[in-house]
């Protein structure tokens, strides 16, 4: 069995879906998951694989040089960096944790990977580094970076740091930039799980501004498959976009959720807009499709229905998040609060 791949931020939404998928589909691969267990990291996202002999969890911070060096020195065949502060609204409240984790954390991983000659590194970046589109057009990998929020600026800094390490040190890295993910295990601060869990309780859903902002939605498993394709076959130094070809205004999406859950439109509540709110994201995925043969498989209609059903079927997971039970669990486990 080859040395394990170090996955960071694997207790979050996308990382946990990625880990489950890879353990299921790649019998020769073993994984170490380094996660700090912030408010967004939840061990309950991976209880079903916790005892898998090809999986190991390590509680730690990607910006902690000692922890990262120890892990990387012990021998890893590659690094896939999911760990991040990921919510735009939180970055508007306080950008500090975003700078530390997203930029300093990435730098710490890159330095350790260089020091111990790790042969492969994938940076999970985001389409938000491109900024905002007008009514037409798509982000390609050549679109200039123009981030608009502290979150996207910190992700762009990390993304460009990876580029600089490739250019300066011949560092063997690849980068993915994906659009908005949805699916199971997403923390209910993001639009889709927030709206589903509010509507389930007949609570209103806060639509920012006029609700006409557009996002391109992709199922989290399609994103996970894109990351794996780029990790395995992407050309060093290259960036690969991924997206779901499912552009929706926030209002269209809200109506779909109301229909699926059988709730009235009166639950829509228009609220003050997010400062600096990007108007539209849309992704040109021709590079990853042509070069790596990747395509999104999950249709938005089916994926959204399945996602709603997942939240309906997992009241304990939602209750644990709402009451902070999982944070108490960490406290017991690690002797401190995780956030
Ligand atoms: P998330 O917030 O659900 O999970 C983040 C995870 O990182 C958590 O488990 C958290 O505990 C961990 N973490 C945070 N700081 C850490 C640190 N200093 N050290 C170790 N672990 C730490 O995020 P997500 O939605 O799963 O996003 C994962 C990655 O994908 C991020 O890099 C994000 O920028 C990127 N991305 C997200 C989307 C999306 O739609 N959610 C789209 C494109 C790219
Ligand atoms: O595009 C990729 C990005 O998608 C990722 O890099 C980010 O980590 C991820 O959080 C996501 O960013 P967004 O800001 O697009 O996602 P969010 O779910 O916060 O918001 C989606 C849209 O819905 C956006 O236009 C803002 C709006 N919104 C959001 C919330 C939480 C509302 O109208 N009301 C809300 O309560």
Image (cartoon, helix red, strand yellow):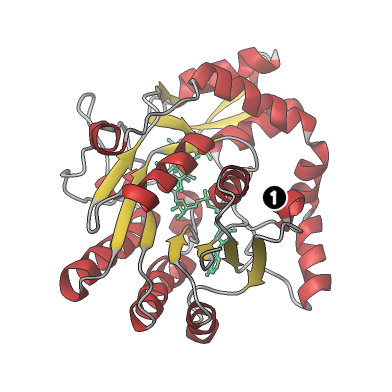
Circle 1 sits on which residue?
Answer: 45
User: In this orientation, does residue 265 appear?
Assistant: no
Q: Position of residue 211 (x, y in %)?
A: 44, 26
SS assignment at label 1: helix
Q: Position of residue 241 (x, y in %)?
A: 30, 41
Q: Residue at x 50, y 61 (%)?
A: 83
Q: Is mark 1 within 8 Å of ligand 1?
A: yes
Mark 1 surroundings: few (<14), some (14-19) or many (≥20) residues within 10 A: many
Image point (33%, 78%), residue name: 114
Q: Position of residue 8 (x, y in %)?
A: 52, 63
211 relative to 319, above or below: above
**Is residue 329 shown left or right of residue 161?**
right
**Place of residue 269 in the rendered image (x, y in percent of width and height, measured from the top left):** 58, 27
Quadrant of image for the C terminus:
bottom right
Quadrant the N terminus occupies: bottom right
Q: Is 155 placed left or right of 323 in the picture? A: left
**Tag count:** 1
Q: Quadrant of residue 324?
A: bottom right
From the viewer's side, name the closer residue of 152 and 176.
176
> As drawn, which residue projects farthest toward the front?
1
Which of 108/78 is in front? 78
Residue 196 seen from this side? yes
Point 42% across, 26% down: residue: 210
Q: Residue at x 55, y 41 (%)?
A: 190
């Amino acid at each position: 069995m080859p040395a394990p791949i170090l996955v960071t931020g694997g207790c979050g939404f996308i990382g946990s879906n990625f880990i489950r998928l890879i353990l299921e589909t790649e019998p020769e691969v073993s994984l170490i998951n380094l996660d700090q267990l912030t408010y967004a990291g939840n061990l309950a996202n991976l209880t079903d694989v916790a005892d898998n002999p090809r999986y190991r969890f390590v509680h730690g911070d990607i910006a902690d040089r000692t922890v990262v060096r120890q892990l990387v020195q012990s021998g890893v065949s590659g690094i896939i960096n999911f760990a991040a502060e990921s919510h735009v609204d939180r970055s508007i409240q306080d950008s500090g944790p975003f700078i530390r984790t997203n930029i300093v954390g990435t730098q710490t991983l890159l330095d350790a990977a260089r020091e111990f000659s790790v042969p492969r590194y994938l940076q999970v970046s985001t389409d938000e580094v491109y900024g905002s589109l007008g009514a037409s057009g798509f982000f390609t990998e050549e679109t200039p970076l123009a981030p608009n929020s502290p979150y996207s600026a910190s992700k762009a800094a990390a993304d460009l740091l990876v580029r600089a390490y490739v250019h300066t040190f011949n560092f063997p890295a690849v980068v993915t930039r994906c659009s908005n993910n949805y699916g199971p295990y997403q923390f209910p601060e993001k639009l889709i799980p927030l709206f589903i869990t509010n509507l389930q309780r007949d609570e209103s859903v806060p639509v920012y501004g006029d609700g006409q902002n557009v996002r391109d939605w992709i199922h989290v498993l399609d994103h996970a498959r894109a990351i794996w394709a780029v990790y395995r076959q992407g050309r060093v130094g290259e960036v690969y976009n991924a997206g779901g070809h499912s552009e929706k205004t926030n209002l269209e999406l809200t109506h779909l959720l109301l229909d699926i859950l059988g709730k009235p439109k009166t639950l829509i509540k228009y609220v003050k807009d997010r400062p600096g709110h990007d108007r539209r994201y849309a992704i040109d995925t021709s590079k990853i499709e042509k070069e790596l043969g990747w395509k999104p498989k999950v249709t938005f209609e089916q994926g959204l229905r399945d996602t709603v059903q997942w939240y309906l079927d997992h009241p304990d997971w939602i209750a644990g998040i709402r009451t902070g039970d999982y944070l108490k669990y960490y406290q017991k486990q690690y002797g401190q609060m995780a956030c």
